Amino acid sequence: MLKQRLNLEYPLAAGKPDLLWQLLSTDHGLERWLADRVVENNGVMQLTWGSPYGEHHTLSANIVERQKNSHIRLQWVDEEEPEAYWEMRIGKSELTEELCLCVVDFAPAEDIEDLHELWDDNLDRLHQSSGF
């Protein structure tokens, strides 16, 4: 099944990209807003939601590309479509010239709305945990 590309842009109050970069590219930073537990090992990020000692769900993603203070691109280990990935990029809003987080992700057409809501929820947690 072909997946559709979802492009999202979220304005951020972050003044400097290096502070935001730590939240996007490190296991400790991602644990503050994206997953309950994140472990990076040899270019693979293992993300766990839920209690590691109780009910939980774990997925692994290969780090395909990482450029400091710019972007990180990952692909789920079990991804069947080679063109499907997820990326978080630090950008500047064309309207306000302020920092923004640009997200690219892929999902089947019937799941695009749910994926959009998931990213909205993730960004709410990012704002709450960092003030960005």
Image (spheres, helix red, strand yellow):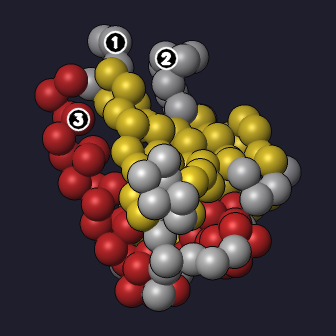
Residue 94 in the figure: left or right of residue 45: left
3 or 1: tag closer to the N-terminus: 1
Alpha-carbon distance for marks 2 and 3? Answer: 16 Å
Residue in front for this viewpoint, 26 or 67: 67
Q: Identify the image quadrant of residue 31.
A: bottom right
2 or 3: tag closer to the N-terminus: 2
Residue 20 in the figure: left or right of residue 122: right
The residue that disc 2 covers is 81
Q: Amino acid at mark 3?
A: Ile
Residue in front for this viewpoint, 132 or 24: 132
Please, is residue 55 above or below residue 102 in the view?
below
**Circle nearer the viewer, 3 or 1:** 3
Residue 59 numbered mark, or none: none
Residue name at image x 38 percent, y 67 percent: 123
Residue 112 numbered mark, or none: 3
Q: Amino acid at mark 1?
A: Leu
- Which residue is situated farthest in the top direction here? 1
